[in-house]
Image (spheres, grey):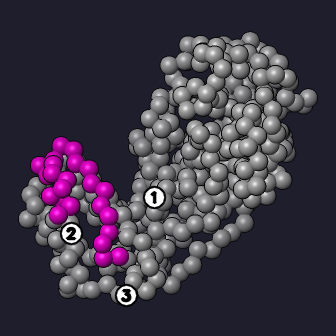
Amino acid sequence: MNVSYELFLIIPPGLEDLAKEEVELKCPVSDIEVIKGGLILKADIDWISEAHLRLKIPTRILMRLTEFKVRDFPKLYQKLITFKWSPFLSHPSPQWEISCTKSRLMHTGRIEETLNDALKEVLKRQPLSKDWEKKNYTPQTFYIRVYDDVLTLSLDLTGEPLYKRGLQVIKGEAPLRENFAAAFIFELMKEVSTPVTLVDPMCGSATFLTEARYFFTPLHLRKFSFEEAPFFKGKMIKKTEEAKSFPIKNLQGFDVNQELLTKVTKSIPDSSEIKLQHRDSLQNKLMDEDFFMICNPPYGERIKIQGKRGQFLSEAWNKFLTIDQPLRFGWLLPSDMDDLFQNPKGYKLSTKRHLKNGGLAVTFWIWIRE
């Protein structure tokens, strides 16, 4: 019988509902609790393995190991040396991510000192096997959260964030994180059954198109931290085939940066399925057929634009919606510009989602042609 663990999936704030829908679609479990910035659920090792391959919206997955009330450092030390570390610890020098709120233990430096002292004592009594040395294991990361004098100890199962897929190595100057792109594509394609062409008119490194192509593809192009943990020892990740795909018949990107498009085309696996073309999308009609469009236009901060930001974006908005007229239009913009883009003629609003991208407040819109 497989052991069930309590897990916390870290989700970019504002995308929790989409992340829950993705779990229910790809790796269903019962009783998913949604909180700001994450999902809490219980699952076994097989689910952990499958989730790391399939889920595209979470940032990382943590395993909650223990929780206890603590108000002073001597008690913290005693709790840590009596905790059973052996099923989880694979490296003698882990890293610690510590946060404290409403707690008597507010000194994160001293908490880290206590953690290291306790772990040294534990390893004297029960030394680790030499696997970590022979196989050159990476130090693990443990998350320590102290809130209202309750300490929660969690193990990072993921390692490098999940949006680092090992898939897309060429980046533009202002790339959108892959998990944001995956979430926006997931929302754009809701309740679509007839195959459509998906267009990104300012595609940059083609993150939207790549995430659309591989959203349902299990990826194991990199290592995950849990693969070196003792509780996973002797097991292997079973890579299964994709069970379905979005109803997208063509993936088409346009951009003015020819050099970037050439590099991206060479780097994407199966790049023949994603067609990239050097073109200024504001000059001529893009497609002679019905299509969906999704766009994260430059804001003039890291990527230069001609003229003022509002003028450039208004020109793009008007061109896309009056000349190209996509069936659905996904549009990501800084939230301080919300008032400039309202009620386009012939379209109804489907989505207006507020979140932060790289510290910048942004709004993701979806308009549907009536």
Residues at marks 3 and 1, CA–CA distance in whole angstroms: 26 Å
* Contact flag, marks 3 and 2 (Cβ < 8 Å): no
* Up/down of 156 relative to 170, above or below: below
Residue named by callout 2: 116
Q: Which residues are magenta?
A: 91-113
The location of residue 30, given as percent across then percent down, is: 50, 56
Helix, strand, or loop for circle 3? loop
Q: Which residue is mark 1?
A: 61
- Type of residue at label 2? Asn
Q: CA distance from mark 3 to mark 2?
A: 19 Å
Q: Which residue is identified by label 3? A: 130
The amino acid beneath tag 3 is Lys
Q: Secondary structure at mark 2?
A: helix
Q: Quadrant of residue 350?
A: top right
Q: Which residue is more in the foreground, 191 or 261?
A: 261
Q: Magenta stretch: residue 348 in it?
A: no
Q: Is residue 278 left or right of residue 136?
A: right
At a point 43% along the width and 47% down the height, the residue shown is 38
